[in-house]
Amino acid sequence: MEVEFDIPESWQKRRIRDVGKVVTGRTPSTKHKDFYGGDYNLISPADLDNGKYVITAHKRLTLLGFRECRALPKDTVLVGCIGNIGKVGMVSDDRSATNQQINAVICNQNNDSHFIYYYLYGSRSRLERAADKTTVPILNKTNFENFEIAVPPLPEQRKIAAVLGTVQRAIEQQERLLQLTAELKKTLLHQLFTQGLRGEPQKQTEIGPVPESWEVVPLSDCAVVQTGVAKGRKLDGKDTLTLPYLRVANVQSGYLDLSEMKTTTIQAKEKARYSLQKGDVVLTEGGDFDKLGRGFIWKGEVEDCVHQNHIFVVRVDRLRVLPEFFAHLSQSPYGKAYFLSVAHKTTNLACINTTKLKGFPVLIPSLHEQREIVDLLEAVDAKIFLHECKKQSLTDLFRTLLHQLMTAQIRVHGLDLSVLGTIDFGRDESNRKKI
């Protein structure tokens, strides 16, 4: 498989066998129970593409099992070669081996393993084309060893790898911050809806403890529940309208995904009956156990929008309950516990009906305390959104740099590296470094 772009004079075309030794792994016999369950990694393609370094593997070996394999040195480049062609990773320490579905590259002293990793990371489509097309695609050792890449001099390899590594570490940091912030929100949701903000004594409810001063009333006492329109009805000869409508696919946990809106046809006289209003809380009636009752607030993003019959609309009495407060309450552990406790369950799915939703025990603190709770949770949501935006921007930057650096459209010595010093690693400004 030839390199598919013109390379600079200082770059050279090389085959994988020229940049390092290719090693194919093996799986120790499962008949020996004392081979498995230890502290050593047996890496398979399922463990690749989960970050640059493979920190842990699905299968673990004892020292005895590990001795049946070929130990790989740190920074060995790993490439999936059976089924999952082109998934890549790197060995994180000297306690790892691979199964036979991976080709491992131990780079020689003339080539930088991190550069080779990034080059192969960006070459997945070419690796897939180089595989033998059988029932299960296979990139055998010979074909992989003959796979051609374009290699700059070692100093330039290292600089390219350093640039890409800087951006990749920033992406990973944003992922960690996202995870930490999501865990913070989960903790806040539990604490705020069981303890409140005033440190007052608690009382027991059917769902658990809540602050003593809070009211607990059925949803039907403080809100109207609206059901949606069913598709597929015969409306021949009737005065109809075709309107955008909110589907289950649009309603996610804690946000609405409105990137793809579809339309449905209803009778003109039904428009008011099925229309969404700004401030409505939309909730799904069913799904996987962890997705039951998912949803959030409709903010009027799409004009004249109606909703599917598998979505409930909750329109609260705003003199008693803030829509934002009920939206967060419904998505909290408190809300999820209620939905699961009353749902009709099958093996993998659960659903609630209108009656059960109307019986939802709504917690009602003062409107002032509701607003304080909402402000806290919205601040956390804003932090999550910020990290998501940063991660997406960094991911876009990484993809652009990977393609342009590996195809020599831009050269690392012509790149303004001071830009990388502004990358946010989630630390204080004083801790940021430039390369």
Image (cartoon, rainbow, N blue to C red):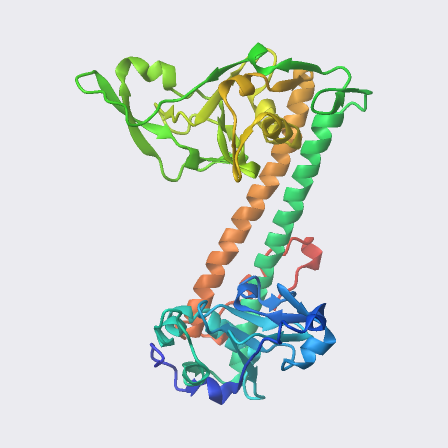
Side of 12 where 210 appears, left or right: right
Residue 414 visible to an observer of this rendering: no
Q: Residue at x 34, y 23 (%)?
A: 304
Residue 249 picture quarter: top left
User: Relative to residue 42, is residue 334 depicted above or below?
Assistant: above
Residue furthest toward the left? 237
Q: How many marks?
A: 0
Q: Residue at x 59, y 43 (%)?
A: 384
- Residue 222 location, x and y as percent? 58, 12
Residue 141 visible to an observer of this rendering: yes
Quarter of the image with the C terminus is bottom right
Q: Choose between 361 and 82: the one closer to the eye.
A: 82
Residue furthest toward the front? 31
Q: Residue at x 52, y 68 (%)?
A: 45
Side of 217 where 416 appears, left or right: left
- Residue 434 location, x and y as percent? 62, 65
Side of 11 where 376 appears, left or right: right
Quarter of the image with the N terminus is bottom left
Residue 405 picture quarter: bottom left
User: Relative to residue 420, is residue 359 depicted above or below?
Assistant: above
Q: Choose between 349 and 173: the one closer to the eye.
A: 349
Side of 123 where 432 appears, left or right: right
Q: Choose between 4 and 431: the one closer to the eye.
A: 4
- Residue 344 location, x and y as percent? 54, 28
- Residue 209 location, x and y as percent? 76, 24
